[in-house]
Amino acid sequence: MTGSAGSKDATVLAFDFGTRRIGVAVGNTLTRTACPLTTIDAQAAEVRYAAIAALVRAWRPGRLIVGLPTHADGAAHAMTARARDFAAAIGKRHALPVDLVDERWTSEVARDELLAAGRGGRSGRAMRDEKAAQIILQAWFDETHDVRRTP
């Protein structure tokens, strides 16, 4: 499920997967910038997948990105497998390519950025998830080959 940005300009949706909340960000391969979009807050899988389907219909992405959680040393843990399963499921449901991006520290970075902007605490939880998705997507843009650059 890895790959690179193609030469076609396309919208990309990214997900910061969690068992309760899924942060979502959107970006475009032309501008190569990510923006927080929303947070899906539901424990029921069917509600989460319906919300994702609505976002896919609305934004018509050419690719999906999912953050891959691991321990600080990169070792897998229980959420790593769950995120991989989630990525496979949304890719199959929407017939779209899915890339996985290392998400170590994204929630902490998002929390710190929101605190610095005066938007921390309990009220900032949903914003933290969509901000984490933005960081994941921006990392994907930054790591993929920019087809507009000349070698």
Image (spheres, grey):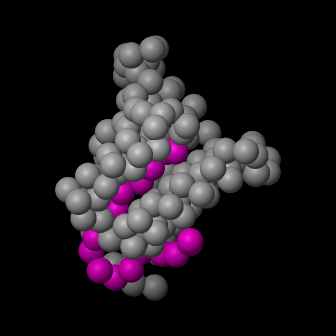
Report the magenta stretch's main SS: loop
Q: Position of residue 148 (x, y in %)?
A: 33, 78
Residue at (52% x, 45% y) in the render: 17
Q: Residue furthest bottom?
A: 151
Residue 130 visible in the snapshot = no
Camera-side residue: 91 or 30?
A: 91
Residue at (54% x, 39% y) in the render: 18
Residue 1 lies in quadrant: bottom right
Q: Position of residue 12 (x, y in %)?
A: 34, 62
Instruction: Residue 7: say if magenta.
Output: yes
Residue 48 lies in quadrant: top left
Camera-side residue: 100 or 115?
A: 100
Q: Residue furthest left?
A: 58
Write down the region rendered in magenta.
Answer: 1-17
Residue at (50% x, 27% y) in the render: 111
Residue at (45% x, 60% y) in the render: 90
Instruction: Residue 98: say if magenta.
Output: no
Residue 41 visible in the snapshot = yes
Q: Position of residue 88 (x, y in %)?
A: 54, 64
Residue 8's place in the image compared with 130, above or below, is below
